[in-house]
Image: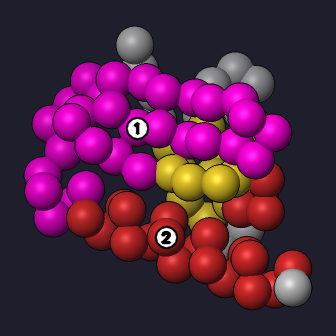
Amino acid sequence: LEFRRVLFRSGIVVNTFPKKHYPWHSIENALIKDDFITIDFKNNSLIQKQINEPVSISMCNEFNAFCEQQLTNSKTSQS
């Protein structure tokens, strides 16, 4: 399954048809681990997909750190 993601400061865009935009304030957590991307939403829904292409450890760490920072910023701005 082809599952492309694009990260923005405003949220995650999933390149499906149609494209879906998920703002950071609706996401509880997002990460890549063991060749899976997981997006956990605050409404208890979950997207989990296997990544079809190899992801380096450094890319995985960069993705996870970016998500963590954006989620922290989102929580801070809503307080």
Q: Which mark is residue 68?
A: 2
Given contact means CB atoms under 8 Å apart, are the residues at marks 1 and 2 in contact? no
Give the residue number, with chain letter if any, for mark 1: 37
Q: Residue 70 carries which label?
A: none
Image: magenta residue range: 31-60
Estimate the spatial distance between the alpha carbons at disc 1 and disc 2, rounded to whole Å. Answer: 14 Å
The x, y position of residue 53, in whole percent, is 21, 31
Q: Among all residues in the image, which is located at the extreme right? A: 79
Crowd band around label 1 with a 10 angstrom C-alpha radius: few (<14), some (14–19), many (20+): some
Q: At 34% across and 23% down in the image, what residue appears?
A: 50
Give the structural element (helix, strand or loop) at label 1.
Answer: strand
Give the structural element (helix, strand or loop) at label 2.
Answer: helix
Looking at the figure, which quarter contains the N terminus? top left
Q: Which amino acid does label 2 sit on?
A: Glu
Q: Examine the structure image and report whether residue 57 is included in the region drawn in magenta.
A: yes
Q: At 70% across and 21% down in the image, what residue appears?
A: 17
